[in-house]
Amino acid sequence: MAEAGEGPKPGRLLLEVVGAVVVLAIIWFATGGPSHYAATGGPFIKPLAPVNTGQVYGNLNSPGSSGTGGTISPGSGSNSGNNLNQSIKISAGSAGSAIQPNDEYIYLTNNASIPVSISGWKLQNAGTVTGGSGILRGSQRSAIIPSGVILYRPNQANSLVPIVLAPGARAVVTTGRIPNTSPYAITNSFRTNICTGYFSKLPYYNFKPSLPITCPDATKEPGVATLDDKCYSFIKNMSRCHTPDFKDDRVNGGQTVDGVIGLSASCQNYLKLHYNYVGCTLFHSADSNFNGKEWRIFLNTLPLWSKDRETISLYNLAGQLINSLSY
């Protein structure tokens, strides 16, 4: 008989340990062993500088996921173990034909399965081209994609955020800017919404290409049913995304609206409140279909793209070539 307090015999303890290891090995192989997703899928992190880049690599999504749960950061160069090459498609837009920077634009479209942040990425032209007669074109130039505004609020400070392209979304990247400042100064890149069509309908706001005209139906604005017949008739005949033009009527007094006289004061106040970009965002920013899938990006620089023998290159923050387009 063993004495009180005597521990287990060494041989028995060894058998228990070996048995536990065997059981764990059986479970491991039964669930996929070395081919299991977790063994190779990642995510993993490279050592930090100066040893390595600290970059995340491997599959960022679990098996069976839709691939929309993560975001490829501006400096990231891989997803699912593959390089981001070709994840952003470049289309020439007006790059081969525009002369002025405000008319020059290209398209960037997200072909990846998850959102991609492109702020801080670099667009670069081909630079010097030489021929039999010497240099045919000037030096290489580039521009950095800026941050932008999700909901643009004119004539006030806007909070800038990284520009993130959702899967299938695109950006129109204009080399120049929107020079007109009245009634709204467009000083930042912005995401489109159902109200930005009001910008396109304003005089002298020459967006290339035009902004989508998707403003809410004017006759379905809140409170429109309480308006008098003449006011309702005026609204019913307005085109979508139209901002009424108010002018002083020096002959009859009061104001004309798009040349129409005799609209009541309450009607004019309603028109001023609802039918413009600011009023539209005030009443519709909570609508389920408010946000668009397109960004308008302004590089605010000199012309970048030549009419021919050009290569448009896109690099991420790590300096990796994401895609290029030659024409």
Image: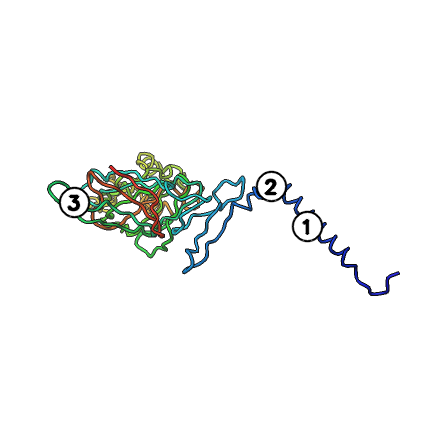
**In this rendering, position of residue 28 left or right of residue 146:** right
Q: Which residue is mark 3?
A: 137
Depth-wise, is mark 1 or mark 2 nearer the camera? 1
Mark 1 or mark 3, which is nearer the start of the sequence?
Answer: 1
Q: Position of residue 297 (x, y in %)?
A: 30, 47
* Helix, strand or loop under label 2: loop
How far is disc 1 from disc 2 in space, using C-alphas?
A: 17 Å
User: Residue 320 in the image: x percent, y percent?
Assistant: 35, 48
Q: Position of residue 51 (x, y in %)?
A: 42, 59
Q: In the image, 239: left or right of 97? A: right
Point out which mark residue 37 bears: none
Task: Tell whether label 1 touches label 3 (CB within 8 Å).
Answer: no
Would you place residue 327 above or below residue 317 in this image?
above
Q: Residues within 10 Å of mark 2 (few under 14, many from 20)?
A: few
Is disc 1 in contact with disc 2, using a CB cutoff of under 8 Å? no
Q: Residue 54 falls in which quadrant of the image?
A: bottom left
Q: Which residue is tagged 1?
A: 21
Measured in 3D between alpha carbons, the distance from the residue under mark 3 to the one under mark 2, in whole angstroms, is 58 Å
Q: Is residue 133 left or right of residue 252?
A: left
SS for tag 3? Answer: loop
In depth, the one of 89 and 132 nearer the eye is 132
| Viewer-side label of 3, 2 | 2
Give neighbour class at mark 3: few <14, some 14-19, many 20+ (Cα, 10 Å): some
Q: Residue at x 82, y 65 (%)?
A: 5
Residue, disc 2: 32
